[in-house]
Image (cartoon, helix red, strand yellow):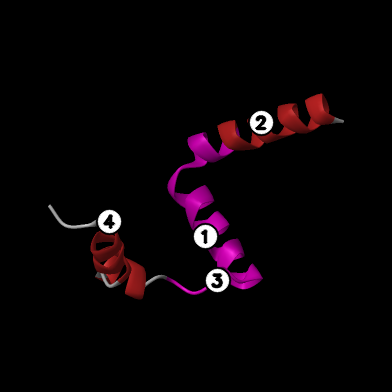
Amino acid sequence: MTPPSSADKDKEQSPAFTSLPPPVSRQNHYWVRREFRRLSPLVYRHHQMAGIAAGRFLL
């Protein structure tokens, strides 16, 4: 059993933390949306309809 402080240090030095992707730029976000739309049109359509419904509900 290691103290929590050393466990946090190990977590920070894990490759998952050190190789985090850069902040999502506008162009990258557009590409992700385009790929998602191309790969799964049904899921995208459902997501779009859910977004419109949520927008109507909020507005």
Mark before the other along the chain sequence, 2 or 4: 4
The residue identified by callout 3 is: 23
- Residue type (three-letter) at the residue carrying disc 2: Met
Q: Which mark is residue 49?
A: 2
Percent across and percent down for residue 31 are: 55, 64
- Local crowd size for mark 4, using a 10 Å CA cut-off: few (<14), some (14–19), many (≥20): few
Q: Which mark is residue 4?
A: 4
Given residues 5 and 52, the one toward you in this image is 5
How much space separates mark 2 and mark 1, taking CA atoms?
Answer: 19 Å
- Local crowd size for mark 3, using a 10 Å CA cut-off: few (<14), some (14–19), many (≥20): few
**Which stretch is magenta?**
21-45
How much space separates mark 3 and mark 2, taking CA atoms?
Answer: 27 Å
- Local crowd size for mark 1, using a 10 Å CA cut-off: few (<14), some (14–19), many (≥20): few
The residue identified by callout 1 is: 32
How much space separates mark 1 and mark 3, taking CA atoms?
Answer: 13 Å
What's the residue at 73%, 29% (across, down)? 54
Q: Quadrant of residue 57?
A: top right
User: Image height check: is 9 above or below 33?
Assistant: below
Q: Is residue 45 left or right of residue 42?
A: right
Q: Nearer the viewer, mark 2 or mark 4?
A: 4
User: Image height check: is 33 above or below 20?
Assistant: above
Mark before the other along the chain sequence, 2 or 1: 1
- Local crowd size for mark 2, using a 10 Å CA cut-off: few (<14), some (14–19), many (≥20): few
Percent across and percent down for residue 45 are: 59, 35
Residue 39 covered by magenta stretch: yes
- Residue type (three-letter) at the residue carrying disc 3: Pro
Q: Is residue 50 left or right of residue 16?
A: right
How much space separates mark 2 and mark 4, taking CA atoms?
Answer: 45 Å
User: Image height check: is 5 above or below 50?
Assistant: below
- Residue type (three-letter) at the residue carrying disc 4: Pro
Residue 38 covered by magenta stretch: yes
Mark before the other along the chain sequence, 4 or 3: 4
